[in-house]
Image: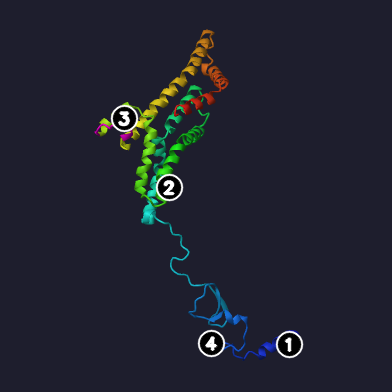
C-alpha cells in the first residue's frame, strides 16, 4: 500500500493543472503538427488525417466522399439509359433457347439421337443431358462459320461506331438466312408465304425472316424424322427375328427384348455406330 501511494502521489499533485484544449496554442513543435488539425476544420486532404476532438484527444477522420464516388456505372447502348439496356439484355437471354431451336440444326440432331436411343431399346442411356450436350457441341461446330461471318459484318462495325444496334441486327440476318436457305424445303416456304399472304419472292434469299423461321424448323423436323426412321429399321429387324425365334421354340415366358437388346448393342458397337452416325449427320450439312 505504501508503494502504491508513493506512485500515485505525483499524479494527484498535478490534478489541479489545466488540461490543454484544442483551442489553446501549442508551444511544442514536431512532425505531428503537420497532420493534426482542430476538430471541425474545413481544410481538405486527399487521405485520412488526424484531428483533435472536443476533449483534446486526437482522432482519425476519413476524407469526405462526394456523392456517387465509388459507385459502379454501367454504360448504356448508344447513350440509352442503363435500365433499358438491362431489360433488352435479359430479354435476349430468355430468347436464346428459341433462337437455338429455330435457327440451328439443334432440333434435327436431338431428334435423331432420341430415335437412336429408342431403337436400341434403352430408356435412360445415354441420358437426356448427355444427348443435349452432344447436340449443343455439334451445333456449335456447324454454326461456327456462320457466327464468324456475323461477327465480322455486324458486331465489329457496331463496336467501332460505324453502325447502330438496329443496323447490326439487320446485317446479322443475312448470314443466318443464307444458312437456313440451304436446308429449307420450297414446299414449306410456299406454305407459310400463303399463310402470311406475302407476295412471291424472286428467290429463296428474298424470303422474309417471318416466313423463313417456321419453314426452316418444319423442314428440320421432317429431316430428323426421316433419318430416325431409317435408323430404326435395322434394329426393328433384329427385334422381329428374335421375337419369331423365341416364339417358335416355345420361350413364351421370356420377353424378346431381354435377348434383342444385347444383340442390338453388340451390332451397334461392331459397326462403330457412333462414328457412322455422327459422320453421316455432319456430312448432311456440307
For the point 46% across and 25% down, which residue is it?
A: 115
Circle 3: element type = helix
State the CA–CA distance, disc 3 to disc 4.
Answer: 90 Å
Circle 2: element type = helix
Q: Which residues are magenta?
A: 197-206
- Would you call the spot at circle 1 few (<14 residues within 10 Å), some (14-19), or many (20 or more)? few
Vertical placement of residue 216 versus 247, above or below: below
User: Of tags 2 and 3, which is closer to the observer?
Assistant: 2
State the CA–CA distance, disc 4 to disc 1.
Answer: 34 Å
User: Of tags 1 and 2, which is closer to the observer?
Assistant: 2
- Would you call the spot at circle 4 few (<14 residues within 10 Å), some (14-19), or many (20 or more)? few
Q: Main secondary structure of the magenta part?
A: loop
State the CA–CA distance, disc 2 to disc 3.
Answer: 32 Å
Going by the image, does 7 lie left or right of 130? right
User: Of tags 4 and 2, which is closer to the observer?
Assistant: 2
Q: Quadrant of the C terminus?
A: top left
Circle 2 sits on which residue? 156
User: Of tags 1 and 3, which is closer to the observer?
Assistant: 3
Q: Is residue 173 magenta?
A: no
For the point 73% across and 87% down, which residue is it?
A: 6
Residue at the extreme right: 3
Of the residues under marks 1 and 2, which one precedes in the sequence?
1
Circle 4 sits on which residue? 23
Circle 3 sits on which residue? 189
Residue 66 falls in image quadrant: bottom left
CB within 8 Å, label 3 to label 4 = no
CB within 8 Å, label 4 to label 1 = no
What mark, if any, has residue 6 been given in the picture?
1
Q: Nearer the viewer, residue 8 or 127?
A: 127
Amino acid at each position: 500500500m505504501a508503494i502504491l501511494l508513493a506512485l500515485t502521489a505525483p499524479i494527484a499533485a498535478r490534478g489541479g493543472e489545466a488540461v490543454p484544449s484544442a483551442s489553446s496554442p501549442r508551444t511544442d513543435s514536431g512532425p505531428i503538427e503537420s497532420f493534426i488539425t482542430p476538430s471541425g476544420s474545413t481544410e481538405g486532404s486527399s487521405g485520412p488525417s488526424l484531428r483533435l476532438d472536443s476533449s483534446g484527444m486526437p482522432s482519425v477522420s476519413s476524407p469526405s466522399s462526394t456523392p456517387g464516388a465509388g459507385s459502379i456505372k454501367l454504360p448504356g447502348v448508344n447513350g440509352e439509359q442503363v435500365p433499358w439496356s438491362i431489360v433488352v439484355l435479359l430479354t435476349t437471354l430468355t430468347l436464346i433457347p428459341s433462337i437455338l431451336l429455330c435457327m440451328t440444326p439443334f432440333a434435327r440432331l436431338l431428334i435423331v439421337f432420341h430415335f437412336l436411343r429408342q431403337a436400341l431399346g434403352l430408356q435412360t442411356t445415354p441420358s437426356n443431358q448427355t444427348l443435349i450436350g452432344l447436340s449443343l457441341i455439334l451445333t456449335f461446330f456447324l454454326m461456327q462459320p456462320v457466327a464468324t461471318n456475323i461477327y465480322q459484318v455486324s458486331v465489329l462495325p457496331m463496336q467501332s461506331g460505324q453502325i447502330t444496334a438496329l443496323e447490326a441486327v439487320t446485317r446479322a440476318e443475312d448470314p443466318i438466312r443464307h444458312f437456313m436457305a440451304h436446308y429449307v424445303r420450297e414446299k414449306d416456304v410456299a406454305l407459310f408465304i400463303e399463310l402470311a399472304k406475302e407476295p412471291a419472292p424472286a428467290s429463296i434469299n428474298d424470303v422474309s425472316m417471318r416466313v423463313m423461321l417456321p419453314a426452316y424448323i418444319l423442314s428440320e423436323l421432317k429431316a430428323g424424322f426421316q433419318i430416325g426412321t431409317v435408323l430404326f429399321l435395322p434394329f426393328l429387324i433384329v427385334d422381329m427375328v428374335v421375337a419369331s425365334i423365341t416364339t417358335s421354340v416355345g420361350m413364351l415366358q421370356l420377353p424378346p427384348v431381354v435377348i434383342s437388346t444385347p444383340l442390338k448393342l453388340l451390332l451397334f458397337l461392331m459397326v462403330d455406330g457412333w462414328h457412322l452416325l455422327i459422320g453421316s449427320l455432319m456430312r448432311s450439312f456440307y
